[in-house]
Amino acid sequence: MSSVPVTPVITSASSVNPLEATVAKKVLVAITGIVLYGFVFVHMVGNFQLYQGPEKLNHYAELLQSMKPVLWTFRLVLLFAVGIHALMAIQLWLRNRAARPVSYASQRFVAGTITSRTMIWSGPLIGFFVVYHIFHFTVGSCHPHFDKHDVYSNVVLGFQQPGAALAYIIAMVALGFHLYHGSVSLFQTLGLRTPAYEPVIKVVFGVVTTLIVAVNISFPIAVFAGIVGLK
């Protein structure tokens, strides 16, 4: 009696379920989004010390600089989160584009909101702004009067430049759109969004996101209004 040979089944990377890959990418976007949302909130709270005067803000900056290992570990984690977040988001967008190669002749946005429809441009805009922000207030190469020992003066003199102040305000509006839609969407991605809790989620993140944007925009406005200035 002859035996029938059994052909081994070889699983390759190409056999990965596209739906599972898409879900995995969305989960990575959600998790890294949580990290970035937390950073934006903490960064806003720290910068709020601008209203407490130069000594308070400069002391806060000196405290951060004195903890070099912690600071650089945090920066590396943040950089990794930004990279993964952007990469996964771009891959998901390209996959959606490939699934619908022919554009609609006309579109009616029935369920879409302005925050969801602007995600495609708010993300890259925020990315470009982050690079500019680093060169402006961290490195100082884009700042006309940069002093690494005087963060308070850097902020005041920096926002006295109309172009820099306007770029900051526009970027914060884009950030608000991005944060709100992303924060609400991540609950759905992680399976935590239900009809019962959805209104609460939208209200909570709407309030927190509005607070972040309003406080951040208040900095250049306060400088222009003379509320914050140099003695």
Image (cartoon, rainbow, N blue to C red):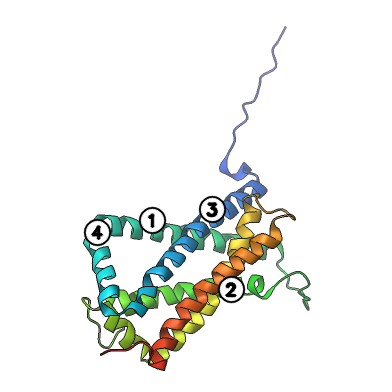
Residues 228 and 39: in front is 228
Numbered disc in front, either 3 or 4: 4
Q: CA distance from mark 3 to mark 4?
A: 29 Å
Q: Quadrant of residue 174?
A: bottom right
Which amino acid, by three-letter code, is at mark 1? Val
- Earlier in the chain: of badge 4 and badge 2, it is 4
Numbered disc in front, either 4 or 2: 4
Q: Quadrant of residue 151?
A: bottom left
- Earlier in the chain: of badge 3 and badge 1, it is 3
Q: Secondary structure at mark 1?
A: helix
Numbered disc in front, either 1 or 4: 4
Residues 131 and 49: in front is 49
Q: Which residue is mark 1?
A: 77
- Binning the other alpha carbons within 10 Å of mark 3 as few (below 14), some (14 to 19) or many (20 upward) gives many
Inspect this view and state whether residue 93 appears.
no
Image disc number at residue 177 = 2
Which amino acid, by three-letter code, is at mark 4? Met
User: Pointer 1 and pointer 4: residues touching (CB < 8 Å)?
Assistant: no
Inspect this view and state whether residue 10 appears.
yes
